[in-house]
Image: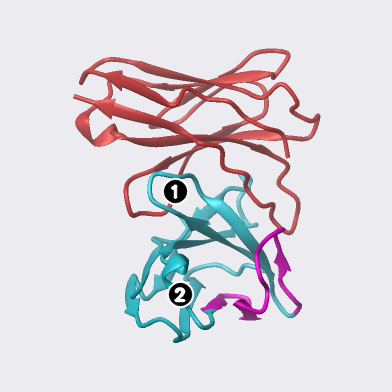
Chain colours: A cyan, B red
């Protein structure tokens, strides 16, 4: 099946710094990717929809100036957490849909564990 | 996006068949039903997807009654490695992809 990778898998940073997370579709092109956030023992919450070549669409309550999304190519979307604070510590997961298949399934990355000290 | 309701948790023993039922009373005509599995600190993994009646693949079966207001994921002969959270999602897969609305999921413990 299609593979989605994320980098880094784990990052620890100081409060006030910015962190960039990469999401790549390795063997397919994805015009749309999605970014989710998951707090411990909770479900995934959609943050934003990343569209190649255009602005991302953010869910209500998600600050677009804090969570910068860039989808510069058909295989790469990046999420930058700017001026990170301890409350931003979470598990960030991206997904992409492989439109080639008939199942229309979404493939998820392995996630990035962000810890802000 | 249609709301889904699943049991919060289920327990089972190795070798048993596990059935997890999901309610989605407000499912739209074009919506598909998709199940994902998630292990701790990993991204969700696609299990199965269906629109109506029964779908079976190498890992699970999905039963959908005629009114499509619910669905049942069936895992045959579970093992310890099937301990995970299972999410039922309902949505319409458009050409650009559709955002998935994850509910609380069902935490399955196999012992």
* x then y, percent, for residue B35: 52, 35
Q: Are marks 1 and 2 on the same chain?
A: no
Whether A111 is among the magenta residues is no
Q: Which residues are magenta?
A: A54-80
Can you give x and y, in whole percent of width and height, for residue B57 in the image?
45, 31
- The CA distance from mark 1 to mark 2 is 26 Å
Q: Position of residue B61 (x, y in %)?
A: 47, 23
Quarter in which the N terminus of chain B is drawn: top right
Camera-side residue: B57 or B25?
A: B25
Q: Is residue B13 above or below residue A54?
A: above
Query: Secondary structure under badge 2?
Result: loop
- Would residue B85 appear left or right of B77 to someone viewing this image? right
Vertical order, B84 against B25 (above or below) = below
* Residue A59 belongs to magenta span: yes
Label 1 crowd bin: few (<14), some (14–19), many (20+), radius 10 Å: many
Residue bearing the label numbered 2: A85
Quadrant of the rendered image containing residue B12: top left
Reading the image, the residue beneath label 1 is B44
User: Where in the figure is residue B63, as x and y percent of width and height?
Assistant: 55, 18
């Amino acid at each position: 099946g299609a593979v989605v990778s994320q980098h880094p898998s784990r990052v620890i940073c100081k409060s006030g710094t910015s962190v960039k997370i990469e999401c790549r579709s390795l063997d397919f092109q994805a015009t749309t990717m999605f970014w989710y956030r998951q707090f411990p023992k909770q479900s995934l919450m959609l943050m934003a929809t990343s569209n190649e070549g255009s602005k991302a669409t953010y869910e209500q309550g998600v600050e677009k100036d804090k969570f910068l999304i860039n989808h510069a190519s058909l295989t790469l979307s990046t999420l930058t957490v700017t001026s990170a604070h301890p409350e931003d510590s979470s598990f960030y997961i991206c997904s992409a849909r492989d439109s080639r298949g008939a199942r229309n399934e979404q493939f998820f990355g392995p996630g990035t564990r962000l810890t802000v000290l | 996006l249609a709301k889904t309701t699943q049991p919060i948790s289920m327990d089972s023993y190795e070798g048993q068949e596990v059935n997890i039922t999901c309610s989605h009373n407000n499912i739209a005509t074009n919506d598909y039903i998709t199940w994902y599995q998630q292990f701790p600190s990993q991204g969700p993994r696609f299990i199965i997807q269906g629109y109506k009646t029964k779908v079976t693949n190498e890992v699970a079966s999905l039963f959908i009654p005629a009114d499509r207001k619910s669905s049942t994921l069936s895992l045959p002969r579970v093992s310890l490695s099937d301990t995970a959270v299972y999410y039922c999602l309902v949505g319409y897969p458009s050409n650009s992809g559709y955002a998935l609305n994850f509910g609380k999921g069902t935490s399955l413990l196999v012992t």
